[in-house]
Amino acid sequence: MNDSSRDEPVIGWAEIERAAERIAPHVHRTPVVRCASLDRMSGASLFFKCENLQKTGSFKARGALHAVLSLSPEEATRGVVTHSSGNHGQALAWAARQAGVAATVVMPRDASRVKRAAVEGYGAEVVLCEPTLTTREQTARQMVAERGGRLVHPYDDRQIVAGQATAALELLEAAGPLDYVVAPVGGGGLLSGTALAVAHRAQGACTVVGAEPAAADDACRSLCAGRLIRPTRTETIADGLRTALGRLPFSIIRHHVERIVTVDEEQIVRAMRCVWSRMKLVIEPSAAVAVAAVLKQPKAWHGRRVGVILSGGNVDLDRLPWLTPDAIRPATPPK
Amino acid sequence: MNDSSRDEPVIGWAEIERAAERIAPHVHRTPVVRCASLDRMSGASLFFKCENLQKTGSFKARGALHAVLSLSPEEATRGVVTHSSGNHGQALAWAARQAGVAATVVMPRDASRVKRAAVEGYGAEVVLCEPTLTTREQTARQMVAERGGRLVHPYDDRQIVAGQATAALELLEAAGPLDYVVAPVGGGGLLSGTALAVAHRAQGACTVVGAEPAAADDACRSLCAGRLIRPTRTETIADGLRTALGRLPFSIIRHHVERIVTVDEEQIVRAMRCVWSRMKLVIEPSAAVAVAAVLKQPKAWHGRRVGVILSGGNVDLDRLPWLTPDAIRPATPPK
């Protein structure tokens, strides 16, 4: 996990191609969809990579499966452990089941009911802990010590990053040449993987832009400062992006990502509702962050071909952020 | 619109193929998606044709565009008129704009805000009337008399039926051989088009099944009786299926549809929520009717390859049928 120079990316093209081959039989090749309304609103030609339609409801299935398929036979007998605010936990539980490996997932007590139920549904053991990053990491290390499994970090792991890179690979193959690819950034696994795939594949013709909640903007500040800055606050509705940017992802992002656009909470909710309403796709707030970044600065993308990674769709359908008291009156059939 | 014999379908294969060619440059070739959870719940291999991702948010774009593209140059100068509970109105407004033709849409006063706003957004004129079928038909005829446009009926029209048939055509091409195709039935345009496409394409190897709300079951009763029975009640949440089965669709359905499965309102809401939650797709209650039919009788489809047409995704996101008073408390970020 050392820093890399511009000329020697930590994860090479061959590693990403191998990840793509390995996981292909098990994951969905998710569709890339267009939307005339959002094209009009942004002034750009948008290509949405639907990782909300991925196995387990997010791109995390890619990295998790790649990590599990990369275990040695001996490691596989001891299983895997992780901590996750939700989607990585679900993904690792699912991946472990695909490979017949045991999984333990440490989750914060405030993780959504939906996400917790899904992890358990995939047959993994859930261990709850206090909702701070430090406690989560400690609890996960303790589980590894007790049970001897391999810790699969949600993003600070080269197999994970190589796996997440495969989403952008498919996006470029399906959409053709793109001027920009926009991906949300929390821990940085997806954004760094995207940046590597684009750097290898588009050879400088395509710019990678990160999208981050202003209320959890450590990646943006780290990129500006040129060094990893720990988050001071993470109070965003985008629950998948509350984590701190990882060292390995940052070492890639600092070289291969042009800029990170931050968006406020209202912009996230508006973008989320817009995608549900116009595109008929259920996306979670973290995915909406990338859409909000595109809608926030239409001039920046005007006339360009822009790929947007819709990272996931795991939301609690009983807790929608745009609902008002009026919403509890169901639609009534006519007399 | 006369009744047809079994050997002479009213709409031939050439007409459906021509419709597919004509509309292809303008409509989406919507994805066919799979879902492991719903496969498990149904015991079948399900192939969902995502017409909720179609232009205007429903399959209706296909038939409406085919009807508009089939106008003579003289008819085109006078424009089109229709009456619609929503989706056909949106679709005709959109299709008319594609072809540079004027459109007038008669809508019931109780049509959802979302659907009315969409019709107006596509540049059509909306004329409101009382929410009864008789008043809607009268008002539409009056508009035709006053303005001289061509009345494009939502389903009792051969161009419309030929256009709707193209969805099943694409489903069969994408999914390969299917044992069943399930489509919802209201006026019958989609179900009759689906039945023709399957009859022509699968040559008896695939059975077409309709899905209908028990609370608006005139198609089921008509098929049983062997004659067109007018609906006595239409109090269903599936607003797209409140219309009476049309003469032309019935003449096709009676020969080419094996049976119609009815589902109650609770089953519709449960199926709708299940698709949102598991498949991350926004579908409207009318589309959920077909899913509910599959989930209601798992034994009927066990081990079979079943195509399901998700007909549309136009819902009011502020009025979700499963919401309780608890739902108005939005998710709060952690302290």
Image (tube, coloured by chain):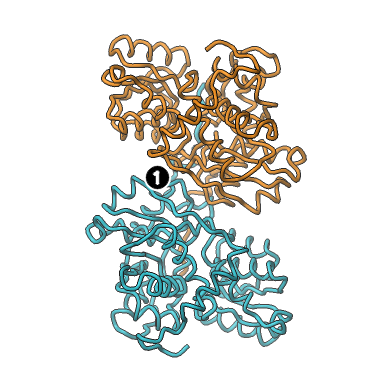
Chain colours: A orange, B cyan
Percent from the top left, x then y, of residue A196?
58, 27
Instruction: Indicate whether B127 appears above or below A273.
Output: below
Q: Mark 1 packing: few (<14 Cα in 10 Å), some, or many (20+)?
A: some
Percent from the top left, x then y, of residue A323?
54, 44
Instruction: Indicate whether A68 appears above or below B193.
Output: above
Instruction: Indicate whether A47 appears above or below A141.
Output: below
Query: Looking at the image, which residue sits at the far front?
Result: A14
Name the residue located 52 percent from the left edge and 36 percent from the top edge.
Answer: A167
Name the residue located 56 percent from the left edge and 22 percent from the top edge.
Answer: A234
Quick one: B112 or A197, which is closer to the camera? A197
What amino acid type should be assigned to the residue bearing mark 1?
Arg
On the image, which quarter does residue A10 sit in?
top right
Query: Looking at the image, which residue sits at the far bottom?
Result: B2
Quick one: B272 or A229, which is closer to the camera? A229
Quick one: B103 or A193, which is closer to the camera? A193
Residue that mark 1 sits on: B278
Left or right: residue B332 versus residue A38 is left
Percent from the top left, x then y, of residue B168?
44, 66
On the image, which quarter does residue A105 sit in?
top left
Left or right: residue B228 versus residue A154 is left
Query: Looking at the image, which residue sits at the far left?
Result: B299
